[in-house]
Image: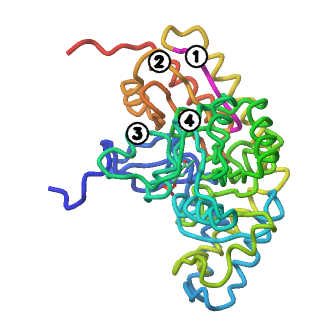
Amino acid sequence: MSSLFPTYQRWELSAKSGKGATLKDTNGATYLDFVGGIAVCNLGHCHPKVIEALTTQAESLWHVSNLFQIEGQEQAAAMLAEQSSGDYVFFCNSGTEANEAAIKLARKHSGKNHIISLKNSFHGRTLGSMAATGQSKIHEGFGTMLQSFSYATFNDIESVKEQISADTAAIMIEVVQGEGGVRIIEPEFAQQLQALCKEYHILLIVDEVQTGIGRTGKPFGYQHFDLSPDIITVAKGLGNGFPVGAMIGKDFLQPAFQPGSHGSTFGGNPLAMAVVKAVLETVFEDQFLQQVQEKAEVFQTYLHQSLQGKKSVKDIRILGLMAGIECHEPVAEFITQARERGLLVLQAGPNVIRLLPPLVVTNEELKQAADILAQVVDQKTAAV
Ligand SMILES: *Cc1c(COP(=O)(O)O)cnc(C)c1O
């Protein structure tokens, strides 16, 4: 019997070790890991540079209070600010906390309460970020939600306009809805949102928890859509498996977060910052991101070759190394069969297979994955 709250539908898989895109389980089986801890291990498992940074830091200093100067935090913040539209950074420990900080900053800066987010979005599990999440299944059973969130339709600018009021502080979006089915924002909608924000003096918050840190072939996903968000949140890929998150904001927001406004005991401690620096130094290199874009094109070609024309396949969506295969039917069975053939992939909603290979994946591994998917999609298991 397990002593854990059964909050997860766990797979029949217990991982023992990993290297790059490969994962080994406790029975000695080897898998191609296109789950990556849910878009976390962007540099693959046990990246040497990250190991080196973590172990070196572990021998000198793990944690000090945020009342102290933390050199690593200054450096990591400068790297995030340099690559983004933002200027100042607040470090925390997860995506949900980064979004919580964003919600608080938007409210405090504007003196307003209302935030528009989008249907089928996912922003986290705390009371604030859960309320921001546009999915009733996430809210169910938890009583009254934090007030003043409303949900507009993805890629429908009229539905956003209708919800704007004098109390609207911000619009919060993902440029690719990850949990919501790998749905990519339309460039026109993105531009219309930016214009609305400008016209009504509303903050634009982009949740880059899943799309950020190189996942889409650019430092941040919004950079594909020519946006200039006021607030950006990141987490998942930021620590490559070390729990860390960050909220990045433009300079005009700085006065709203002063000593005592917000805080975190663990957020941005030296151990986390050593890892973040190693990750960012690797991912934010032009050549590295160029390679990610090349791999993404190769992957797209393989996926189309393997899956286009399959009866079950409705749509193939890809931005960088974030791909979704929407099927006409539930995909749970395909995912189980892929696992039995050595490929780990995720579901996003009932009908979408989500693929999140590490950014260090090889073209050969991408081909293997596409081949396995071709074997399992359209295969119906015999009725039992
Ligand atoms: C995973 C995710 C979150 C929540 O991050 P946690 O680290 O699990 O709290 C928030 N937003 C998006 C877009 C995510 O994908």
Q: Tell whether position 35 is magenta.
A: no
Q: Can you identify the residue that label 4 sits on? A: 355
**Crowding near pointer 2: few (<14 within 10 Å), some, many (20+)?**
many
Amino acid tagged 4: Leu
Quarter of the picture containing the C terminus is top left
In front: mark 3 or mark 1? 3
Residue occupying image coordinates x 48% and y 12%:
312
Helix, strand or loop: magenta stretch: strand
Q: In the rendered structure, which segment of residues is drawn in magenta?
A: 313-320
Q: Can you identify the residue that label 1 sits on? A: 307
Residue occupying image coordinates x 72% and y 84%:
71
Q: How far across and how far down the image is residue 175, in percent? A: 67, 40
Q: Secondary structure at mark 3?
A: helix
Q: CA distance from mark 4 to mark 2?
A: 14 Å
**Crowding near pointer 1: few (<14 within 10 Å), some, many (20+)?**
many
Mark closer to the chain start, 3 or 1: 3
Q: CA distance from mark 3 to mark 1?
A: 32 Å
Dots 3, 1 in contact, CB < 8 A: no
- Disc 2 Cβ-to-ligand 1 distance below 8 Å: no
Residue occupying image coordinates x 69% and y 31%:
157
Relative side of 284 to 363, left or right: right
Q: Can you identify the residue that label 2 sits on? A: 377
Q: Secondary structure at mark 4?
A: strand
**Residue 86 versus residue 56 in the image, above or below:** above
Q: Can you identify the residue that label 3 sits on? A: 136
Q: CA distance from mark 3 to mark 4?
A: 25 Å
**Front residue of this view, candidates 25 and 70:** 70
Numbered mark located on residue 353 in the image: none
Relative side of 325 to 143, left or right: right
Mark closer to the chain start, 1 or 4: 1
